[in-house]
Amino acid sequence: MDIRPIRSDGDLEWALGEVAPYFDNPPLRGSADADRFDVLSDLIEAYENRHFPTVELEPVDFLYVFMEMAGRSQADLGEILGSRSRASEILHRKRALTVDMIFKLNEAWGVPAECLVKPYRLAVA
């Protein structure tokens, strides 16, 4: 099956190169190629989890990162939330996100709701 452990970044690059063609041309379920894809994907995930742990962000920090990556601005956020001042209050932690706001962000931009429903501290007045 030509599969080996992933012990280095070089091994990771090899494994990623091996699975990349399967994204454009998925193997048939139950085939040897499908098994190979599954095993390599599991090895890649295990290596990445060990060497590149995810950082849990507070909801507002996550929103900042999401907006930056998506090329969104505070004005864009204001359109979703109903006003620029409300967007400013959220981003400056003067107002908490509500369930309605989280729903709107999920619907409009695809922001994962589970990343926004965590408790976080507001700024002290």
Image (cartoon, rainbow, N blue to C red):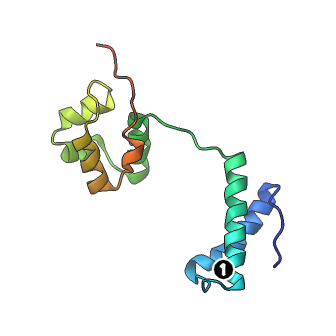
Q: Could you tell me residue 70's position as x and y percent?
A: 39, 53
Is residue 92 or residue 98 the one in the foreground?
98
Is residue 110 or residue 43 the one in the foreground?
43
Q: Could you tell me residue 55's position as x and y percent?
A: 56, 39
Q: Could you tell me residue 101's position as x and y percent?
A: 24, 42
Residue at point 31%, 55% (across, down): 109
Direction from residue 56 to residue 100 in the image, left or right: left
Is residue 31 or residue 68 the one in the foreground?
31
Direction from residue 91 to residue 43 in the image, left or right: right
Residue at point 34%, 56% (across, down): 110
The quadrant in which the N terminus is found is bottom right
Is residue 74 or residue 4 the one in the foreground?
4
Which residue sits furthest front?
30
Q: Quadrant of residue 22?
A: bottom right
- Neighbour tally class for label 1: few under 14, some 14-19, many 20 plus, Cα within 10 Å: some
The residue carrying mark 1 is 34
Q: Could you tell me residue 122's position as x and y percent?
A: 34, 22
Q: Quadrant of residue 46?
A: bottom right
Q: Quadrant of residue 83?
A: top left
Residue at point 37%, 41% (across, down): 116
Judging from the image, what secondary structure is the residue with disc 1 in? helix
Which residue sits furthest top?
125
Relative to 33, is 119 above or below? above
Residue at point 72%, 47% (across, down): 50
Relative to 7, is 57 above or below? above
Q: Amino acid at mark 1?
A: Ala
The quadrant in which the C terminus is found is top left
